[in-house]
Amino acid sequence: MAGPVTGPGPEEWAPIVLRLPDGRQRLEVRLYERRQDDRGPWMYRIGIPLWQHAGGGDVEPVEFRTWVTAGVLEPIDGVDLSAVVTHRAAHDSPVPEPSRWAWVVRPARGPAGRRGVVVHDHDCPLAAGAGPELGIDQALDAMLRPGAEACTRCDAAAVLLPALQLGAGVTGSVGASGQGEG
């Protein structure tokens, strides 16, 4: 649940950077929890420090907590995120194993007109007519571009995000999108 929370809580947290919607400003916030949904994308519960009117002309510090996607967060070099509560999805079925994996990259627009790409499985209806099919290495390279996301409406997020996170741990540096074209 999003909303203001007064005072510090007993929860473990780690600092992380939140990119604001204008695309230029960045704010250090608290990362409390990360949760993976059933299709693979991760959501991150953050706390944003703010001031709130306290009555009588005074203000007091509060923390606004909300859930965001990986696409708006940036890890801080040297910060260990291992103490942050992590809930991985309980996958009832294994990662899909199609007869062949091919990927398509479509341009997308994010918040404030920020350009990026969304990587889709070649069979995804959102990828129809988008361009040439790519191999796994090319798709992973595309996912490393700033603003890149994996589609959650097809197998792209379930296959590509775990592959990217294998050597790096879950840092929030790659994202997932159910938006398709943005």
Image: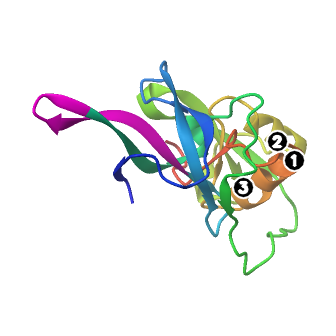
Residue 55 place in picture, x, y as percent: 13, 37
Tell me where residue 52 sits by quadrant: top left
Locate residue 179, reporting x and y percent.
Answer: 51, 50
Left or right of residue 64, residue 70 in this image = right
**Which residue reaches farthest bottom?**
92
Disc 3 designates what residue?
156
Kindly identify which residue carries mark 1.
136
Q: Which residues are magenta?
A: 45-59
Q: Amino acid at mark 1?
A: Ile
Q: Look at the numbered discs 2 and 1 and tell me whether their residues touch, using CB distance below 8 Å.
A: yes
Identify the coloring. Answer: rainbow
The amino acid pointed to by label 3 is Ala
Q: Position of residue 99 (x, y in %)?
A: 87, 68
Determine crowd level at label 2: few under 14, some 14-19, many 20+ residues with C-alpha closer than 10 A.
Answer: some
| Rendering quarter of residue 157 | bottom right
Taking the magenta stretch, the answer to whether it contains residue 122 is: no
